[in-house]
């Protein structure tokens, strides 16, 4: 693991990272809010985070059940009207290209914006769920979200139950199959790439440590050091995700 003094970016850091990507037998990407910021989606926490503007209580299940219309008005405003306008950025597209060329096996994302899939990525594990679908809280049937957002709160056409978006609320556990699959990929890889995640949100923040404990090399891409940087990271590439992936693409000589 690199020391703090070794994180002054060297000219060959991108080349070394590229060599690791090429030599890796199983590479997994782990993405957070930072990969989508350049698509116009702000992070949830921090100085310019969404929770500085909105009270997140509307994403607590008990509040959602008691005040479904109020909750759904904010959910639609933030996650559908606002996030829905976002488009993949160059980082998303380069990640998808790396996957197509067999250089990335899986992408574990904490984001619910579907931008990896829109860019063409296929093996995407959505750790915190997705805004694409809704589930009836009564009969558990699933529906495509875009068909049910004209009238709030949306209700199940089969039983009349309240529909909830399929992303994880604050007091909800991560679905077991998603959690287990994410851990499985972390334990299988020999190269783990962190992109735009600070390591503050449990239990997602534990996944990179599992990869490290099994001996995987760790590359981190972020605009500033995080909780991971001086603990488990081997190569820290400082900068915006689009900038770093463009440089990596060049180092990999992808055309």
Image: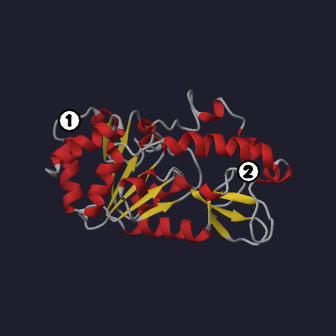
- Say the numbered circle drawn on residue 151: 2
| Residue at screen point 52% across, 35% down | 42
Q: Nearer the viewer, residue 214 or 52?
A: 52
In the image, residue 221 above or below residue 255: above
Q: Is residue 201 left or right of residue 119?
A: right
| Residue at screen point 78% across, 50% down | 64
Residue 199 x %, y %: 51, 46
Q: CA distance from mark 1 to mark 2?
A: 55 Å
In the image, residue 158 above or below residue 255: below
Say whether residue 27 is visible: yes
| Residue at screen point 72% across, 54% down | 171
Q: State the image quarter where residue 237 is shown.
A: top left
Nearer the observer, disc 1 or disc 2?
2
Give the residue pinned by disc 1.
10
| Residue at screen point 65% across, 34% down | 51
Give the number of callouts.
Answer: 2
Q: Are marks 1 and 2 in contact (CB under 8 Å)?
A: no
Q: Nearer the viewer, residue 96 or 51?
A: 96
- Helix, strand, or loop for circle 2? loop
Q: Is residue 40 left or right of residue 71?
A: left
Mark 1, Cα crowd under 10 Å, few <14 / some 14-19 / many 20+, is few
Residue 67 x %, y %: 83, 47
- First along the sequence among labels 1 and 2: 1
- Helix, strand, or loop for circle 1? loop
Q: State the image quarter where residue 48 is shown.
A: top right
């Amino acid at each position: 693991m690199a020391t703090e003094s070794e994180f002054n970016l060297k000219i060959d850091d991108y080349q070394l990272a590229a060599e690791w990507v090429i030599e890796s037998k199983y590479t997994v990407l782990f993405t957070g809010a930072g990969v989508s910021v350049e698509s116009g989606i702000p992070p949830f926490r921090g100085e310019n985070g969404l929770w500085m503007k909105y009270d997140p209580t509307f994403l607590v299940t008990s509040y959602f059940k008691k005040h479904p219309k109020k909750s759904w008005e904010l959910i639609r405003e933030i996650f559908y009207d606002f996030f829905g306008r976002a488009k993949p950025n160059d980082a998303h597209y380069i990640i998808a290209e790396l996957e197509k060329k067999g250089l990335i096996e899986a992408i574990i994302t904490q984001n619910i914006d579907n931008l990896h899939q829109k860019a063409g990525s296929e093996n995407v594990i959505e750790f915190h769920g997705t805004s694409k679908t809704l589930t009836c809280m009564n009969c558990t049937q699933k529906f495509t979200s875009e068909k049910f957002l004209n009238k709030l709160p949306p209700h199940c056409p089969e039983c009349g139950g309240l529909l909830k978006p399929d992303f994880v609320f604050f007091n909800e556990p991560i679905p077991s199959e998603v959690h287990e699959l994410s851990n499985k990929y972390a334990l299988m890889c020999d190269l783990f790439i962190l992109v735009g995640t600070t390591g503050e949100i449990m239990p997602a923040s534990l996944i990179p440590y599992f990869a490290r404990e099994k001996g995987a090399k760790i590359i981190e891409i972020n605009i500033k050091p995080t909780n991971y940087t001086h603990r488990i990271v081997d190569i820290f590439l400082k900068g915006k995700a689009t900038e770093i992936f463009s440089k990596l693409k060049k180092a990999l000589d992808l055309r």
